[in-house]
């Protein structure tokens, strides 16, 4: 019973966090569209992020199925709680992918880009440092902005195209 209550609390907390984050990103993206006068190009950069979420979904699904078939491993009450938590986390992962995928893309206008509410002009980019899960964009003013790995790769392609022109 305690596991089911904990699962419900986790689901509620993560659902509220996703909703709050979505509202913040939505406002920032609307502001970027207004600044750009709706001349924004959306570059898909969320492919790996979605695949990671779907992989976690499959792992949680496997855990729930295994626990349902072998409840003696966790005890009867523990098995029900573990299954409830697994199903709740699967629901949260699906919610996260469906709601937040839009905000994982790279939004570009003629002057700069927007990633997670951070707007950076192309002329102010000094260097882009690649990393495993995120790229760091260093500006001329010394500010560092972290962008997702997918957005960083696309941004590097854009910068190479701009330099080639």
Image (cartoon, helix red, strand yellow):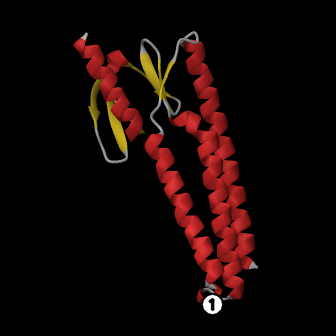
Is 165 in front, or is 2? Answer: 165
Which residue is situated farthest in the left direction here? 164
Disc 1 secondary structure class: helix
Q: Position of residue 140 (x, y in %)?
A: 29, 23
Q: Position of residue 24 (x, y in %)?
A: 63, 34
The answer to whether residue 79 is left or right of residue 44 is right
Judge left or right: residue 52 versus residue 33: left
Residue shown at the point (64%, 38%) measured from the top left: 22
**Left or right of 117 in this view: 5:** right
> Does residue 61 lie above or below 92 as drawn?
below
Q: Quadrant of residue 37?
A: top right
Is residue 139 visible in this depiction of the protein?
no
Quadrant location, the N terminus: bottom right
Q: Is disc 1 surrounded by few (<14), some (14 to 19) or many (20+) residues within 10 Å?
A: few
Tally the marks. Answer: 1
Residue 159 appears in view:
yes
To which residue does mark 1 refer? 72
Q: Viewed as shown, does residue 46 lie left or right of 124?
A: right
Q: Specify the quadrant that holds the C terminus.
A: top left
Q: Is residue 125 above or below residue 73?
A: above
Residue 92: percent from left, percent from top: 65, 55
Tell me: residue 115, above or below residue 57.
above
Closest to the observer, 161 or 141: 161
């Amino acid at each position: 019973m305690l596991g089911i209550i904990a699962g419900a609390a986790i689901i509620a907390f993560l659902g509220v966090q996703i909703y709050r984050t979505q509202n913040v990103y939505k406002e920032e993206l609307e502001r970027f569209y207004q600044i750009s006068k709706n001349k924004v190009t959306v570059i898909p950069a969320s492919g790996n992020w979605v695949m990671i979420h779907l992989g976690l979904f499959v792992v949680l699904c496997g855990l729930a199925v295994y626990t349902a078939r072998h409840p003696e491993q966790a005890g009867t009450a523990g098995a029900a709680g573990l299954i409830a938590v697994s199903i709740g986390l699967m629901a949260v992962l699906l919610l996260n992918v469906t709601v937040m995928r839009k905000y994982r893309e790279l939004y570009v206008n003629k002057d700069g880009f927007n990633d997670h509410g951070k707007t950076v002009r192309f002329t102010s980019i000094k260097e882009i440092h690649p990393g495993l899960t995120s790229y760091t964009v260093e500006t001329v003013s010394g500010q560092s902005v972290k962008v997702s790995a997918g957005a960083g790769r696309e941004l590097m392609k854009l910068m190479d195209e701009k330099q080639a022109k």
